[in-house]
Image: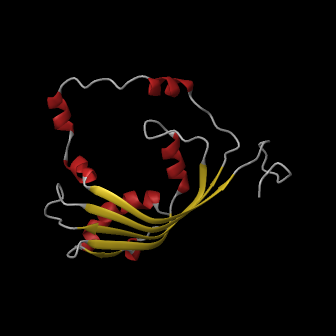
Amino acid sequence: MESFVLNLFSDQLSKVILDFNPNTINANLLSGKGSITNLRLNVDVINEFLNKPPHGSLPFVKFTEIRLSELRVEVTSYTNLKKAPIVLVIEEIHASAVEPMEYYLDPANAQNKAQPPPQQQSSNQARQQYGLLHRILDNLSIKINRIHLTFQTLGKFKTLRRGIWTPP
């Protein structure tokens, strides 16, 4: 049963987790717990996600490496996923980020952020779009125990060469 469920998610997980192997997941569906240790995340996918609206626009930071020591999933009840809490527990995040050499701010996106979002046409249409996935995400909580972030700036003059203006 566990292998069937893991195969459903393996395509999505392989996009985010480098060197993903479904055999590395310790999963027990009856107890509602699963864990993966020593993960390296695909920073290209994360940087792309952070730089594109509507998810966010963070052009001043570029992640070079993100590692998770342990990722655990705790589900209290599979029979009632709509109302049961799902907890993602991350023990440690080790992330390295740099200031990119160049970044581009789209002025059209900056103007769109200033405008209020358009009102929905009817509440009935909004109820139809709210499905099982939205209910599960409403009950999802993420607990992070420790974050280690290393950020390297390029200094006053943007260059990759170390010099008097580049902090250590």
Query: Which residue is farthest front?
Result: 145
In the foreground, 84 or 146: 146
Number of disc labels: 0
In the foreground, 128 or 20: 128
Q: Does residue 130 appear left or right of residue 63 in this picture?
A: left
- Measured from the top left, where is residue 82 in percent x and y? 17, 54
Q: Which residue appears at 18% of the width and 65% of the height?
A: 78
> What quarter of the picture does the N terminus occupy?
bottom left
- Measured from the top left, where is residue 109 in percent x and y? 50, 28
Q: Which residue appears at 32% of the width and 58% of the height?
A: 141
> What quarter of the picture does the C terminus occupy?
bottom right
- Measured from the top left, where is residue 30 in percent x and y? 20, 75
Q: Which residue appears at 38% of the width and 57% of the height?
A: 12
* Position above or below: 135 against 32: above
Q: Does residue 28 appear left or right of residue 101 in this picture?
A: left
* Position above or below: 19 against 16: below
